Image (cartoon, grey):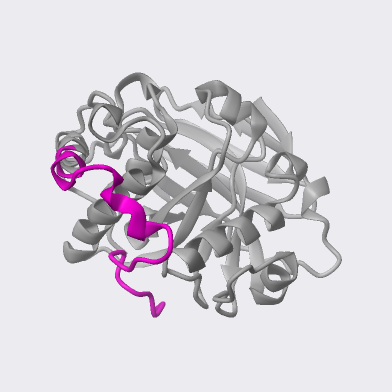
Amino acid sequence: MNDHPSPSGTGGHAAGTAAAPSARIGSAVARLTEAAATRTPCAPVREFIGSTDLNAAYEVQRRLAEARSAAGARVTGAKIGLTAPVVQQQFGVFQPDFGVLFDDMVYAHTEPLPLGRFLQPRAEGEIAFVLGKDIDRPGAGVADVLRATEFVLPAIEIVDSRIAGWDLSIADTVADNASSGAVVLGTTPYSLTGLDLARVGMTLQRDGEPVAFGAGHACLGSPVVAVAWLARELVERGRPLREGDVIMSGALGPMVPVTGPGRFRLALDGLGEVEAVIEEAAATAGEEKTQ
């Protein structure tokens, strides 16, 4: 569908991965791979790559993404993490990051998600962007994002961590594909024309009870600003955003633990609703959603 380069594509930032020896990067890859395969949370990988070496962390992420692609998963976009101050404060990490979005992570409104595919899931409300044009210009800004966006959707992200107890540094979460799990997309598209995403209010319910509130301005000032940041980062790394990409733009409010089966419903002012249905059905080791 999307004409993406392989996740192995590198650019300006990625050239600096020599900061951490390849053997240590390989050790981090192996630890996270085993945690995902066995569905058993692991110790942080910062002991191998350091807690602040983003080049090394993105190299771990790249290798894991490359292996996932080789196994048959298709890159369908990207996700931005650590955008909301309340989430940054939860982890003591005060800068955004990004991860790769694969087709086997994407679910539709009310489509059941098996609880067994996750290790330590949490839910958060977001706005998803779907691109109608590439964004491949260095220094891309808000205007580029507005021109390239075909429509937006209400979305719930089920974030997850292979790191035990969510004991994260910025390097741990980056290496772990920005603590990705799954995403649930609404089914009604909305145009950005005349819509101020910074002012969009959010309510997230769990089984009918409100559990989180937020607004678009919590996402780096506006989700559009967050996507512009991502576009610049990916151009520098040689993996620009492409037509058809789905972009999870970041949390509008706090994460909510997913402690068992249930229904999470997100309502966004002017952007409708979306519901994530978490079911008890287990996923076996290595099993992923197929479309």
The vertical placement of 231 against 84, above or below, is below
Quarter of the figure that contains the N terminus? bottom left
Q: Can residue 160 be seen in this view?
A: no
The vertical placement of 90 against 232, above or below, is above
Judged left or right of residue 175, residue 79 is right
Please tell me which residue is depicted at 73% across the width and 55% down the height of the picture: 271
Please tell me which residue is depicted at 64% across the width and 69% down the height of the picture: 140
The vertical placement of 180 against 130, above or below, is above
Name the residue nearer the viewer: 193 or 20.
20
Location of residue 33 by image quarter? top left
Q: Residue 270's x, y, as percent?
A: 79, 54
Q: Is residue 224 magenta?
A: no
Judged left or right of residue 234, residue 251 is right
Q: Residue 80's x, y, as percent?
A: 53, 49
Please tell me which residue is depicted at 29% across the width and 55% down the height of the picture: 62
Name the residue nearer the viewer: 206 or 161.
161
Tag count: 0
Q: Residue 31's x, y, as percent?
A: 17, 35
Judged left or right of residue 28, residue 9 is right
Q: Is residue 7 magenta?
A: yes
Q: Can residue 242 be seen in this view?
A: yes
Q: Give the range drawn in magenta.
A: 1-27
Name the residue nearer the viewer: 114 or 220.
220
Q: Residue 11's x, y, as percent?
A: 40, 66
Quarter of the figure that contains the C terminus? bottom left
